[in-house]
Amino acid sequence: MSTNLRPMFAPAGVVVIGASRQSGKLGAAMARSLAAFPGPRALVNARRPEPAEGVYASVAEAAAGTDGPLDLAVLCVPAAGCADALAEAAAAGCRAALVCAGGFGEAGPEGEQYADALRGVAERTRIRLLGPNTSGFFAPQLGLTASFVPAAAHLPAGDIAVVAASGGVNHALSFDLADAGNGISLGVGIGAGLDVTAADVLEHLVADAGTAAVALHLETVPDGPRLVAAVRRLAAVKPVVALVVGRSDVGDFARSHTGALATSWRTTRAALRQAGAVVVDDERELVDAITALSRVRLPAHADPGLGIVTAQAGPGLLLADRAGADGIRTPELTEATQDTLGGLLPPLTYQRNPVDTGRPGETFARVLGATAADPAVDLLAVYALTEPDSVDVASAAQDAGLGADSPAVVVVGGPHEDVTEQRARLHKAGIPALAGPTSAANAVRALVADARQRARGAVAGGALEANGIRVPAGPLDEDRAKTFLSTLGIRTPDRAACDTREEAHRAFERLAAGGQSVAVKVLDAAILHKTEIGGVRLGIRTAAELEAALDAIDAIGSRDGIDSTEPGGRRYLVEAMAPPGVDLVLGARRDPVFGPVVLAGLGGTAAEALADVAIRLAPLSLAEAAAMPDELAARALLEGWRGGPVLDRAEFGRVAAALADALAASPPDVAEIEINPLRLTADGLIALDAVIVHTGAVTTPTGEETGPETDKETDHAQA
């Protein structure tokens, strides 16, 4: 099928199939919306054709009676008739089609049949299809409004594209962007996405000279790798700001510890961020972010510094407080800059950063220029009111040289008419103007996030060179799983796998020499939740305690139908206890949408309850892996909290990247590799428990059949 979407979004001519004279009908609304289209336009109504008025009985007649090709067919017919109408359009030479009707997959089995028929026509004729179940799209600079919302024709032309899962969200975001002083290059509602998906539109926009930045709204992702590839290509040449729906949906992930944390919403956001998109939390933040990024883009920078100049102290404090909460530096200005400011401002004003000018005067432009030029400042945020007989903010910003070469965001407060005029002048000069401190903070966060991500990508380069080490064929018990981790260079405790109680005693004598305590566990690949069934005993220091532990583990068989009296029926793992430290969870699993992913978080139930996790697509570079702990809200625990151990980011990066690479290199039946806990000690990282899951149902000790799971225990929590 053709990858060219120009016949869809920049057609030579348009035909509306199902045009109607009844104002309330979809076909009538679409005909009104398309009335301003400057190219050839035709209407098709098989029941009431009027060729003299441009209404034809068929698409073939419309094509013959129209001066120019009809590239785009807009189908305004019920679901049951869409497949036939699409086939007719394709036969008449149309190369793209928009289907607005509902009643397809969302309507049950009958609707699925209609969807299958529509998809079959598209595949057979190679016509590109947008929809169904969408309100359409618009390209204001072309005078093209293929939407049943006629008001979309009044959207101003500009350089921001909107790609939304929902046609309604496409319109809502576009109107919000226009209210914020922006123009639209293209606005697309994907709808059901039977053919054209968000990834298709993003790829189309890579080479679209009329688009400077892209707002992306997602609800579901049919093809994760393709979406990531499209975002990565686009973000390399123009900013992408993404809003993902589904914060409260945990999905149908497997009941593993990693799966419970890595919800589809979090994984999607992480994947988009890793691909280069700026990910936002709501539509207001999206509008603020894209307003800024469509006009300025910071150079790639690992940690940009923010300068703040405010003509009113309170709003400046709001900006500074939000910057601190977002982890953005507001460095103290150099002595030279402070000396310059001291000659421009009253002596009682604060001049170290933020810079409080008091009521702005004739020196305001020079204050802006001096602050922006400070070596520690990569981005300037400005707040001022449009007061009578006060400074002209737009002129001052331009006189200071703010813009693409000196990035800044400006907040102008005051009466609506004054603010609108100032904002228009600032935008024309390439300076994003925002509506208040919160909006400015949103814009600052987006600009800094974009710069940081591109800096990380430049350092990371490609994926870690594959080591070719594959997971052995399963099932694997804990000892074999840890042996595999050792081949990856991941440290594990000294241990012994024991087939008999006698072997367990000999292992104890070796491992407990010098008074060290040991852990004793049931060793069985089929038992995934050892702690829950009493299969883990910690702090064993004497032979008598070992006997008691072995008795308790053997007793599991009498409770759960496992005969431990048969030769080889019960095995034990005797293992040296690890020193105290901070527990993490690190897992690699196959996400059903995005493929191999890696998850890292603090160990224990708090990480699961708070969802304090970092996620990356696999394989990943050492630099990407090493940066994962920096995203954790509890990262202070890894930085020597109260005299505790300090995480070596490089060591963590090697462990995480090795785990990711192993899963990516292994056959698809390897579903998950998890280390939980991975303990940070004074001597570095050590894997205290390991689970490797192969696909296929497993039977728990209670006889319950489940899908792939991992062990949720924290065996060494009391060490």
Image: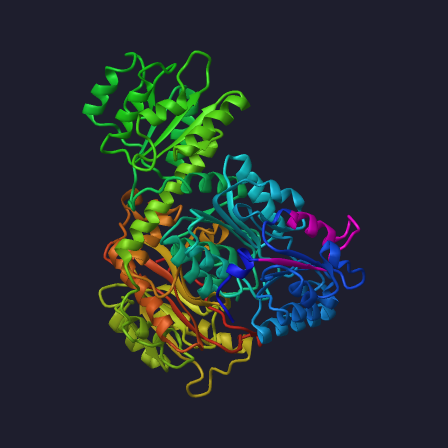
Q: Nearer the viewer, residue 40 or 527?
A: 40
- x then y, percent, for residue 425: 43, 28
Residue at 76% in and 60% down: 45
Q: Which residues are magenta?
A: 13-35
Q: Nearer the viewer, residue 340 or 207?
A: 207
- x then y, percent, for residue 347: 28, 12
Residue at 35% in and 74% down: 665
Can the viewer see residue 379?
yes
- Is 602 within the magenta? no
Q: Nearer the viewer, residue 358 or 656?
A: 358
- x then y, percent, for residue 654: 27, 62
Q: Is residue 14 left or right of residue 232?
A: right
How many labels, in total?
0
Question: In the image, is residue 346 above or below residue 48?
Answer: above
Q: Nearer the viewer, residue 115 or 577?
A: 115
Quarter of the figure with the C terminus: bottom left
Q: Quadrant of residue 218?
A: bottom right
- Is 28 within the magenta? yes
- x then y, percent, for residue 281: 50, 45
